[in-house]
Image (cartoon, rainbow, N blue to C red):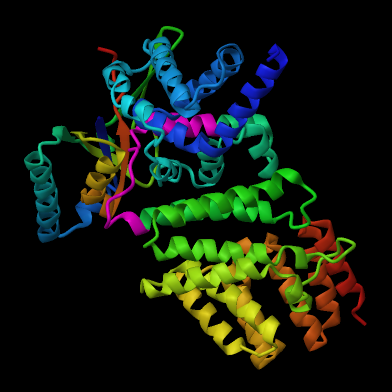
Amino acid sequence: MEYVLFAYVDEAGWPKLTKAEQEQGMAAYTAYYEALTKAGVLKGSNRLQPTSAATTVRSANGKAQVLDGPYADSKEQLGGYFLIDVADLDAAISWAARCPASMHGVVEVRPLWAMPA
Amino acid sequence: MSIGEGDQQARSTADAVARRSYGRLVAFLVARARDVTVAEDALSEAFAAALADWPLNDCPANPEAWLLTVARRKIIDISRRRRSSEMVAPQLELLTEGLDAAEADAGIPDRRLALMFVCAHPAIETGIRAPLMLQVVLGLDAKTIASAFLTSPAAMGKRLVRAKDKIRQAGIPFSVPEREELPGRLETVLDAIYAAFTEGWADPGGTDVARRDLTGEAMFLARLVAELLPAEPEALGLLALMLHAEARRRARREAYGEYVPLAEQDPALWDAQMIAEAEVLLMRASALGSIGRYQLEAALQSAHADRCRTGRGNWSEVVQLYDALLALHGSPVVAINRAVAIAEIRGAGAALEAIEAVAADVRLAEYQPYWAARAELLAKTGANEEARRAYGMAIGLERDPAVRRFLQRRQSALE
């Protein structure tokens, strides 16, 4: 089954880190990315720009309402995702638990909606 | 044989099969269908088909195999009906395989344990795990479960459906976890069984049939887990704990249905066989060398029973057990019970101090045993006015009328 691991992290925390800490943080994500790749489960991954770059669009009565900022304001923001293909939820959870974001934020595990063949 | 007799016989055979094999049948079908709802629906359609077929063609020699064959076809029908909305097609071929072995042989592989791990998966909302297990593994209907858990059948039905959807959509695996994950995952299974048990226990008078039956069903599940995982000490511990509680059921009520607290119970009324079985289980569990919450709780019940039977004071041993439990499974509830034990050694004043340490926990404001314990301790120190108020809180929070009357008698006995 395919799952997306959504990494929610406190994006305000990143700029506060020292250069060395940032490098360490990047290395953790790189190592995780490599582990996913080597295990042959990674289907795609991206890091997102901070929510200050987000724009929210909602259409009502044929008219688009455009708002500055992310959809939900919360302590942690969606910072990136990993799309993986694994056997079942337990396998997805074990990958989520290894994700650096699960240590300094939270990881949401969501199965993809499988389209009928 | 008349039609009526045939109907009668078909029904009683079907009832007997449902009683002895429901869980095995549904677990076997879930393993194939990978969908709890589909498996349940297929099995219930197979039972309906049996009631129509058996009176005409006699009951089959192997009714379980007959039901599985019909249920397999029903699974394919149901899956085809649903194919438009969600993916099922890839699994259809798998469904038709693997049932022949079961048909040839009466021995259906027992997959009930895997089914319990599905129902109590950490991805399932905690509060619905016990109801889910009762429905899926034991076949209880939503109405019965709802009445036992004091909610409306409609609300319970909805939550059960949502949980089963989650199992399918999230891809919760149908398997017993690997060795290294087993203890952690087993905990959620045992917790769900214990939740069902305590829910049933809330009506110790046995006046509410649905609730009383629930303790029996929970006991059945605990036995099943202990049999299927005989080397898991906590599974043995939970069964021992439940046996100790169950053994005292009769003694908790006197002839007129009034509540009798442990210290005033007549040990002759306890079920000696259950206590003996619990003790054997505890010994086996402790030999496995890994202590846990349920073993400690069972050991506490064992210590309480032993004290009441022999009159030998063992309060320091009891406090030690509570200390261990608190370290392992810290909860204000354990802290209160520990304080009550401390009162027996160091007096009510010391116990009240111990209770104060946890009194700030907001969960306790609505917890009857906290107020009852507090009231007893205050009464012992002579703080009658405060004791009266604490009894008032306990009485207001109690659901069981017999316990309420007991607390009212204590309250009015204050000077």
Q: Nearer the viewer, residue B140 or A77?
A: B140
Give the x, y percent position of residue B272: 66, 71
Q: Quadrant of residue B290?
A: bottom left
Give the residue displayed 45% in from the left and 26% down from the top.
B39
Up the image or down, B258 lies above or below B4; here it is below
Up the image or down, B136 lies above or below B402; here it is above
Indicate the quadrant containing the C terminus of chain B: top left, top right, bottom left or bottom right. bottom right
Q: Quadrant of residue B74?
A: top left
As for residue B102 lying within the magenta part, the answer is no
**Residue at the extreme front of the image, as rendered:** B1
Q: Quadrant of residue B47?
A: top right
Give the x, y percent position of residue A12: 27, 49
Residue B353 seen anywhere in this rendered image of the structure:
no
**Residue at the extreme top of the image, as rendered:** A62
Up the image or down, B372 lies above or below B60; here it is below
Give the x, y percent position of residue B170: 35, 33
Indicate the quadrant containing the N terminus of chain B: top left, top right, bottom left or bottom right. top right
Up the image or down, B42 lies above or below B254; here it is above
Give the residue displayed 52% in from the left and 49% down from the top.
B221
Give the residue displayed 52% in from the left and 29% down from the top.
B161
**Residue at the extreme bottom of the image, as rendered:** B346
Side of B128 where B272 appears, left or right: right
As for residue B165 lying within the magenta part, the answer is yes
Side of B232 where B244 appears, left or right: right
Give the x, y percent position of residue B29: 41, 29
The residue range painted magenta reads B159-183
